Image: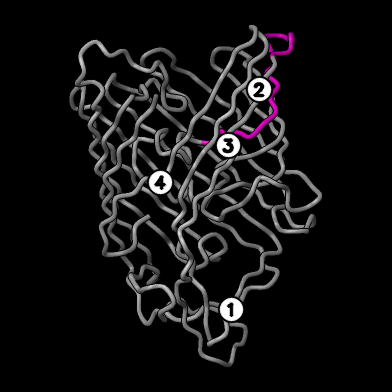
Amino acid sequence: SSEPRSLDFRFDQFTIGAYKTFSPWLSAGASLEVERHGHRHSHGFDPDSGCPGSGTSCTEQFGAEEITTEVSLHRFNITGIAPIGNGLALSFGRFDTPFGYERHDAALNLTATTSEVNRFGRPMSMTGFQAAYQFTPWLDATAWVVNRWENETTEDPLEDNNRDKSFGGRVGFTPLSGAQLLNFGLGGWWGPEQDDDTKHDRWILDLDVTWTPLPRLLLAGELVYGGDSGVSFRRRGTPIAAPAVTNQDVNWLGLYALAHYDLTRWLGLSFRYGFFDDKDGARTGVAQMLQSFTIAPIVHLWRLIPDLRPLGVTYARTRHPLDWVDLRLEYRLDHSNKPVFSDAKPAIPISEADRDSHQVTLQLVVNF
């Protein structure tokens, strides 16, 4: 993202993929992603990095990390349908974690930014083996065994970081189909996620829902409650001063609710509320309650071109079509009950911080 109090033109992400159906029972797909990362991490200095002692003063400051460009095998899968019952789908590869509607890729969301749940509360991706089965038109189930919890916020790679695997699943219910599609799911995740540690497990319970009560209206939401054991992290300095944590059990709770309405054929409006209670500071680094309010008008530019057919793809578990070209103007207000937002320059001690952050994003998304 851009530096505070600055206006930048950015080209942050490009993804290209290829998908092939070889037969009714065998398919494969892969995508490459080129992404520029401009993260700012907070470090403690006393003046040594890390705030190691309890008897010395310590002040946080942002690192002077350079913007990096990363090329990655973003998604990959080989899927076969075993002739068992209605057909058991067996897949190997790297997948989006099938919780909620939000995805890491900007093109697959109805806002320019993602919620706190997506950023801090649950894994975004997973690499391993997945099985899915459709019991009836209204009941489906997915289960997986994967390397680890992968999240872009914490920059987790896809390689396993210990000798055990992580497990999870989701059961989906679709009581209403067709134009008024209603889908909700209950899922979970369990596995050790700390480096070279197989004794302490991280887990989440996840409830998600999407509903299209009216042809132009989409509602979506997600609730996650999670925990981790044996967690340790460093002492934090001013302005978020807190002692070091050693071998502690931690929990967090998060949710978001989104509404999108197409005012006309070519103009839509999205609103999202987000909440994240990181009461032990394990997910964000600060024991805090985060809230966000996001509003984003969306101009579907491709719909202004006569006779241009739609892509034929929808957002996850919805009837809302994915568009060729979208222009989004988003305003986001973030609020914390702790002073965690600062516009300090890198490598400059942060003497004070705010409880509120304002962000405006003009985003152009192209799908082809």
Give the foreground label among 4 and 2.
4
Crowding near the residue tagged with mark 2, few <14, some 14–19, many ≥20 C-alpha atoms within 10 Å:
some
**Residue of label 4:** 12
Name the disc covering residue 50, or none.
1
| Sequence-earlier tag: 1 or 4 | 4
Q: Marks 2/1: CA distance? A: 45 Å
Give the SS element for disc 3: loop
- x%, y% of residue 307? 24, 10
| Sequence-earlier tag: 4 or 2 | 4
Q: Given the image, on which type of amino acid does mark 2 rest?
A: Ala
Q: Marks 3/4: CA distance? A: 22 Å
Q: What range is drawn magenta here?
A: 81-99
Q: Given the image, on which type of amino acid does mark 1 rest?
A: Gly
Give the SS element for disc 4: loop
Which of the 4 image quarters holds residue 24? Answer: top right
Q: Quadrant of the N terminus?
A: bottom left
Name the disc covering residue 132, or none.
2
Q: Marks 3/1: CA distance? A: 33 Å
Q: Residue furthest bottom?
A: 55
User: Which residue does the image show at 39% across and 79% down from the upper left?
Assistant: 350
Give the SS element for disc 2: strand
User: Which residue does the image show at 38% across and 27% down from the upper left?
Assistant: 367
Give the foreground label among 2 and 1.
1
Look at the image and say whether residue 92 sits in the magenta stretch: yes
**Residue of label 3:** 97
Give the SS element for disc 1: loop
Q: Quadrant of the C terminus?
A: top left
